[in-house]
Structures are given as structure tokens and as C-alpha cells.
Amino acid sequence: MELGSGTEQYGCVHYRRKCKIRAPCCGEVFDCRHCHNQAKDSLEVNVSDRHEVPRHEIKLVICSVCNKEQNVQQDCSNCGTCLGKYFCAKCNFFDDDVAASPMPAIYQKKMIWILCNDCGTTSNVQFHILAHKCPGCSSYNTRQTRGDPAACSRV
């Protein structure tokens, strides 16, 4: 499903997406884990109350279009809105910055080798500054193993 027009009005300074998270640590709703951490782990917060959200423990999201609270998933179970084009169920991560960030021409043909931390597959994929998707299991939980990101392919 496509996020569609008007996406720029949703999300926060960290991520453009159409959902908010319910932090499992304090039960409060935030646009993202970074917004939570800025609010709950700042100097303005009593030292004994400071904490960060455990991202992998996030279980609930709230659709920004219809306000339906639901389990973490890519599409809203109520209105069908795509909550984020880039979604990782293992990491509980939504983001559209990868899809919205085309690479400069000098990097468009750059290939690197990655290892998927979820399925263990080694793959040769197109370089991107933000993330690399495993072609085997579609996870973004990957790490680069070979290929210099600073070395540009000739166009």
C-alpha cells in the first residue's frame, strides 16, 4: 500500500510515517522512540524517572489517520492506511526516509555485500546511505561485509 499524498503532515522531525507508538515502559504515546527518549531521558526529568524506550518491546501503534490503537503492523487494521513504506516487524521500525532518499548519481550503481542478521544470508545489494534490505527475508537488520561505500562506481 502507498502512503499517498499528505505524508509530510504526519510523523515528527525524526520519521515521516502515519503512526505513533505506545511506549511499553511508561504507557505514554509518542510520535517515535526518539521523541520518547528526548522527553523521558532529558535533564528536565527527575533522575530516578529517566528512561529510554526498549524499541524491540514496542507492541502497540496508533494510526495517525483514524486513531485506532493496534498491534505493530505495516497497514492499519481499521482504515487500511499504510503506516510506513519501510517497515521491519522484528525491529518494530517504520520509516519512509529510505524510500524518500534517492542516492546521488555516483552511488546509483554502487553495489556492496551485506550479511543479514536475521536469516544469515550474504547478498550483493545496491548501496544506500540509510539502510540495506535483505533480498532473502526483506529485513533491514543487515550489516555491510564488503564494498567500500566511499568508493564510487563510474557512471
Image: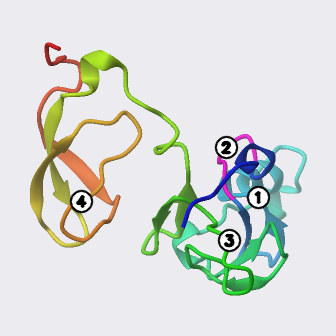
**From which residue to which does the magenta span run?**
12-17
Q: Which mark is residue 81?
A: 3
Q: Tell me the SS state at disc 1.
A: loop
Chain-order first, disc 4 or disc 3? 3
Callout 3 touching callout 2 (CB < 8 Å): no
Q: CA distance from mark 4 to mark 1?
A: 27 Å
Residue 21, quarter of picture: bottom right
12 or 57: which is nearer to us?
A: 12
Q: Where does the N terminus fall, quadrant-wise?
A: bottom right
Q: CA distance from mark 4 to mark 2?
A: 23 Å
What is the x, y in percent for residue 150? 23, 19
Callout 2 touching callout 1 (CB < 8 Å): yes
Check disc 2 and report the residue beneath it: 14
Question: Is residue 60 shown in magenta?
Answer: no
Identified at 79% across, 75% down, the residue is 26
Q: Tell me the SS state at disc 2.
A: loop
Identified at 77% across, 83% down, the residue is 69
Crowding at dot 3, Cα within 10 Å, few <14 / some 14-19 / many 20+, comes out as many
Residue 40, quarter of picture: bottom right
Crowding at dot 4, Cα within 10 Å, few <14 / some 14-19 / many 20+, comes out as many
Chain-order first, disc 4 or disc 2? 2
Q: CA distance from mark 2 to mark 1?
A: 9 Å
Check disc 4 and report the residue beneath it: 134
Q: Which of the two marks, 3 or 1, is nearer to us in this view?
A: 3
Q: Tell me the SS state at disc 3.
A: loop
Q: Which of the two marks, 4 or 2, is nearer to us in this view?
A: 4
User: In the image, is 25 to the left or to the right of 124?
Assistant: right
